[in-house]
């Protein structure tokens, strides 16, 4: 069992983690994935779920909390001593394979998880409004990651030569009316800015943390049974335009590659493998570019796949294997 009761002469243990004198463990040696200041209405949920998100790879699974009691006093800040509970916690046998730190993280998050689930299901306007903003952030970040994957696939990361009219501070890659080289350079500039931000804070950039927090909240709302909104029409139109241009440019590159191979009397290699470091993104791109994108479930599945497959979240994804 994950919880062992030794009687009133000794403390209850969670695989070596004291519960009756409750000091919940944290994963302080690793960069924090969630940031509560990004979404104020959900701040208590985000704060309570920090450790859980570290173990889950920033994904939310409602089944993770099966058999986890909602002790009302296990909602203090990570690492803070909470004091003695009146009675030992009783955790269901379904959690018997959870390690002490993982179970402790779930115990800390459980009260907020259940409280915010009820509030969302009751349709609190302020929560729903902020959830819509979180969904928009997830969509925008997912489109950005798909664009980066496309530029890598097209060997334009960064573009060569560098566009002369794009300064290093220009990160407005959202303007898809510009030339492909300009869009690629702006997106590359944005990536460099994020890298510098991550280096300064010693972990993950603020933009990435904001996106991961938004993804966690959207995951949470989906698990709570809320209907997801469609992707905004303006965002769809911008994305489809970019996807069409990317596909056309790739076709031209493929034809040029085959022509060069024919001139050299060589067998053409698999061009699609050049300049691409993400098979998932390559497979997902045509699907995202299709009209199926307007399906809320399709949006969430593809968006989370792209968002959570980005290079800066690979470690978190590996940690997610710990949770079932």
Image (cartoon, helix red, strand yellow):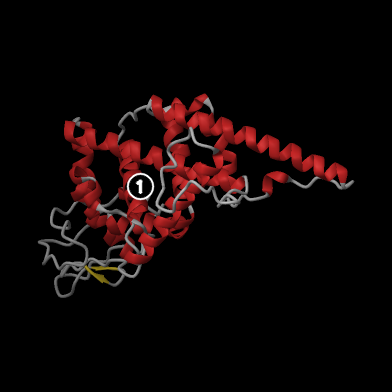
Residue 126, image x and y in percent?
A: 17, 35
- 120 is higher (above) or lower (below) than 215: above
Task: State the residue in front, 286 or 83.
Answer: 286
Examine the rendered structure and indicate whether residue 127 appears above or below residue 264.
Answer: above
Which of 259/112 is in front?
259
In percent of width and height, residue 190 lies at 42, 51
Q: In this view of the protein, can residue 124 be seen by the observer? A: no
Give the structural element (helix, strand or loop) at label 1: helix
Q: Which residue is drawn at 53% across and 31% down?
A: 289
Q: Where is residue 168 in the image (x, y as percent from the top left)?
A: 44, 54
Q: Quadrant of residue 122?
A: top left
| Residue at far right of view | 265
Please give the name of the residue rendered at 83% of the width and 45% of the height, measured from the top-left corner. Answer: 261
- Considering depth in this image, is 324 or 205 the residue closer to the camera? 205
* Residue 91 picture quarter: bottom left
Residue 77 located left or right of residue 165: left
Q: How crowded is mark 1: few (under 14 residues within 10 Å), some or many (20 or more)?
A: many
Front in this rendered view, residue 107 or 132: 132
Q: Residue at x 22, y 54 (%)?
A: 47
Q: In this view, does 266 lie to the left or right of 142?
A: right
Task: Identify residue for label 1.
Answer: 211
Q: Residue furthest front?
A: 164
In percent of width and height, residue 115 lies at 18, 43
The residue drawn where x is 86% and y is 42% is 262
Q: Is residue 175 visible?
A: yes
Q: Is residue 133 above or below residue 323?
A: above
């Amino acid at each position: 069992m994950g919880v062992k009761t030794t009687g009133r002469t000794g403390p209850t243990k969670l695989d070596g983690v004291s519960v009756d004198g409750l000091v919940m463990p944290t994963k302080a040696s690793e960069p924090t994935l969630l940031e509560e200041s990004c979404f104020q209405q959900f701040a208590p949920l985000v704060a309570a779920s920090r450790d859980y998100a570290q173990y889950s790879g920033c994904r939310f699974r409602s089944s993770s909390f099966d058999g986890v009691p909602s002790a009302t006093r296990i909602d203090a800040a990570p690492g803070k001593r909470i004091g003695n509970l009146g009675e030992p916690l009783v955790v269901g046998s379904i959690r018997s394979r959870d390690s002490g730190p993982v179970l402790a993280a779930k115990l800390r998050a459980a009260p907020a998880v259940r409280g915010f689930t009820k509030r969302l299901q009751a349709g609190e306007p302020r929560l729903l409004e902020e959830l819509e903003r979180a969904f928009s952030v997830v969509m925008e970040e997912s489109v950005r990651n798909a664009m980066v994957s496309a530029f890598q696939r097209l060997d334009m990361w960064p573009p060569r030569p560098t566009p002369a009219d794009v300064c290093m501070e220009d990160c407005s890659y959202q303007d898809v009316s510009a030339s492909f080289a300009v869009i690629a350079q702006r997106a590359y500039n944005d990536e460099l800015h994020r890298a510098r931000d991550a280096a300064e804070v010693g972990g993950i950039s603020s933009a990435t943390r904001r996106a991961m927090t938004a993804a966690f909240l959207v995951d949470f709302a989906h698990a709570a049974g809320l209907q997801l909104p469609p992707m905004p029409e303006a965002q769809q139109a911008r994305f489809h335009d970019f996807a069409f241009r990317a596909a056309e440019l790739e076709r031209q590159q493929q034809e040029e590659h085959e022509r060069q191979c024919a001139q050299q009397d060589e067998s053409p290699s698999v061009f699609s493998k050049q300049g691409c470091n993400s098979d998932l993104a390559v497979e997902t791109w045509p699907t995202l570019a299709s009209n199926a994108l307007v399906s809320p479930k399709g949006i969430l599945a593809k968006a989370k796949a792209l968002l959570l497959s980005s290079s800066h979240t690979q470690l978190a994804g590996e940690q997610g294997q710990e949770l079932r």
